[in-house]
Amino acid sequence: MSQLNKTTTPWKARLEKNTISLFLWTFAWLCTTALVKFGSKYLWDYDTYLSAAAVILNIVVGSLMILMNKRHLDSSDEMMKKIQLDAMAMSLGIGLVLGLSFQQLEAVKLISFQPQIAHLVMLMSIVYALAVLFGRRKYA
Amino acid sequence: MKNRLKVLRAERDWTQAQLASELDVSRQTINAIEKGKFDPSLPLAFKAARLFDMAIEEIFLISYSRVINRQLFNC
């Protein structure tokens, strides 16, 4: 038990480092998404090459964000992984089921507006956040 | 699954954070295992057994009655 007095373990330090990396790459992806959306309109007046470059940059940064998310999950301990897995299952399941139902509402004339992908993203994000909170409470 | 982790930890006067640090998991995970809310993986159970210098079954106790009931009476 020589290391019982240590305060920061390699595991904890790695998790903190990966959490910060994930935050930074998520922020970078958000910025490139905004660049694609607003850049073509306000910065380069829908220039084809610049728009394509912005989209490619968005995909590359997004891919790195996904890799960072995987690395973050890998560095989490087993209970955290379980909480994340449950949250992702809920998010994917509810997103798929309610997303398809919501999309059909317009087709069967129950709503007058066009369902957007952003609605699905918001739903999945809210479900994911709530499921993580619920999981943390469950094991607390 | 029941376990004696809390007792063994208390006997050695270790905190949850110290034990978590030694097992490379979070303090919350130790807390959940001690309360029986979360079952550790086999590698983590082995790690705990090695740390306490005991056999796994001396630390983690499965509810045999349930298993036997399932095997004998299929319920």
Image: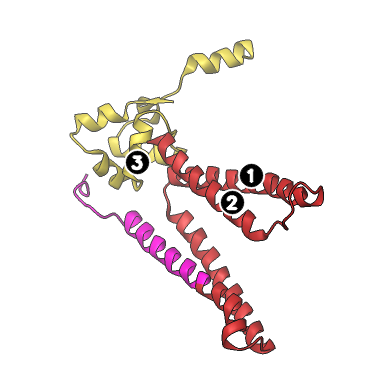
- Coloration mode: by chain
User: Which SS class for mark 2?
Assistant: helix
The residues bearing labels 1 and 2 have C-alpha atoms spaced at a distance of 7 Å
Q: Specify the colour of chain A.
A: red
Residue extending farthest to the top is B73
| Amino acid type indicated by mark 1 | Ile
Q: In the image, what residue type sits under mark 2?
A: Met
Q: Is mark 1 on a helix, strand or loop?
A: helix
Residue in front for this viewpoint, A42 or A133: A42
Could you say where residue A123 lies in the image, as x and y percent from the top left?
Answer: 59, 50
Q: Does A140 lie within the magenta span?
A: no
User: Callout 1: 10 Å neighbours few (<14), some, many (20+)?
Assistant: some
Q: Mark 1 lies on which chain?
A: A
- Residue A17, located in which quarter of the rendered image? bottom left
From which residue to which does the magenta span run? A1-30
Residue beneath disc 3: B28
Q: Which of A39 and B73 is in front in this view?
A: A39
Q: Which mark is residue A58?
A: none
- In the image, the chain rendered in yellow is B
Alpha-carbon distance for marks 2 and 3?
26 Å
Query: On residue A124, which mark appears?
Result: 2
Farthest residue to the right: give it: A108
The circle drawn on residue A94 is 1
